[in-house]
Image (spheres, rainbow, N blue to C red):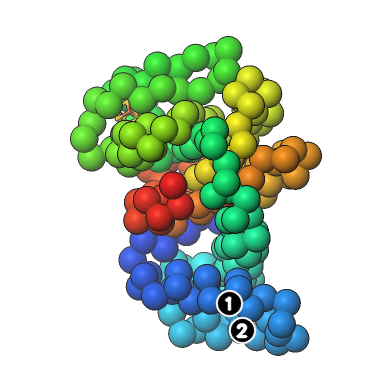
Amino acid sequence: MPYKFTFDLSKVPRFFFTEIARVSYRKGMHKTFLKNLQDIITKFRIQEATGLNLSDAVVLLQDLIDLQAVNLLERGKFMQAKKRALFLPHCSRKYMDNRCKAFFDASIPSYTCAHCSKDCLVNKADRLAKKKGYDVYVLPGASCIPKILKMGRYEGVVGVACGEEIKLSGEILSDTDIAGQAIPLIKNGCANTAFNMDTLVKTL
Ligand code: SF4
Ligand code: SF4
């Protein structure tokens, strides 16, 4: 399920994400956590950069921090995982129409990238992950995940999606012994979305 608002953090300074990681690490130690969120929103001019109102910006930031905190908790177990999969969102394909030459397997359901466009984020991520031994799925939504997990017997998964979809995926993984790592979209909207390739490289 998408957020009720759209955002684009692609022009926000990289230091913003370092700050998110720092606050995630210290989360729980602060009684003034909400105040911290508001300070970060002001410091990085998130409302000006995204056009979000304060409460939506707080929701977004809270989700980014929560998922980063879970990433930190799961990292050790994930590093031990031998059989891994990468889940990419279909909305990050360069094209959402028939110019995308990906093969759609309705029985999974998942797309398999056909590498038609060099500058497509999904193409780049797919090539990178496969080189590292990952199985790659390009998913229309988190509801496809249980079937894939059942078929693949994975020990670790990396999921790229907007915060709302990552929350759904987290609920699915919490019923399993699989270690998860999440990478949030930095631009949502269900088409032409974006994630950070450097973050993906580090996570894989
Ligand atoms: S590179 Fe892959 S995912 Fe991107 S548009 Fe082409 S087939 Fe689709
Ligand atoms: S932004 Fe992408 S990952 Fe999030 S709900 Fe829309 S299609 Fe799914």
Residue in view at x 45 percent, y 23 percent: 111
Quick check: is the Cβ at mark 1 less than 8 Å away from ligand 2?
no
Report the amino acid beneath label 1: Val
Of circles 1 and 2, which is in front?
1
Mark identifier at residue 63: none
- Residue named by callout 1: 23
Horizontal relation, residue 106 to residue 128: left or right: right
Helix, strand or loop for disc 1: helix
Report the amino acid beneath label 2: Asn
Mark identifier at residue 36: 2
Q: State which image quarter holds ligand 1.
A: top left
Of residues 96 and 73, the one nearer the viewer is 73
Q: Is residue 15 above or below residue 137?
A: below
Can residue 190 be spotted in the picture? yes
Q: State if disc 2 and disc 1 touch (CB < 8 Å).
A: yes
Of residues 14 and 28, the one nearer the viewer is 28
Residue in view at x 40 percent, y 16 percent: 103
Quadrant, the N terminus? top right
- The extreme left residue here reads 118
Residue in view at x 52 percent, y 81 percent: 40
Q: Residues within 10 Å of mark 1 (few under 14, many from 20)?
A: many
Quick check: is the Cβ at mark 2 less than 8 Å away from ligand 2?
no
Residue in view at x 23 percent, y 31 percent: 117
Q: Is residue 17 above or below residue 8?
A: below
Of residues 3 and 156, the one nearer the viewer is 156
Q: Position of residue 44 (x, y in %)?
A: 43, 79
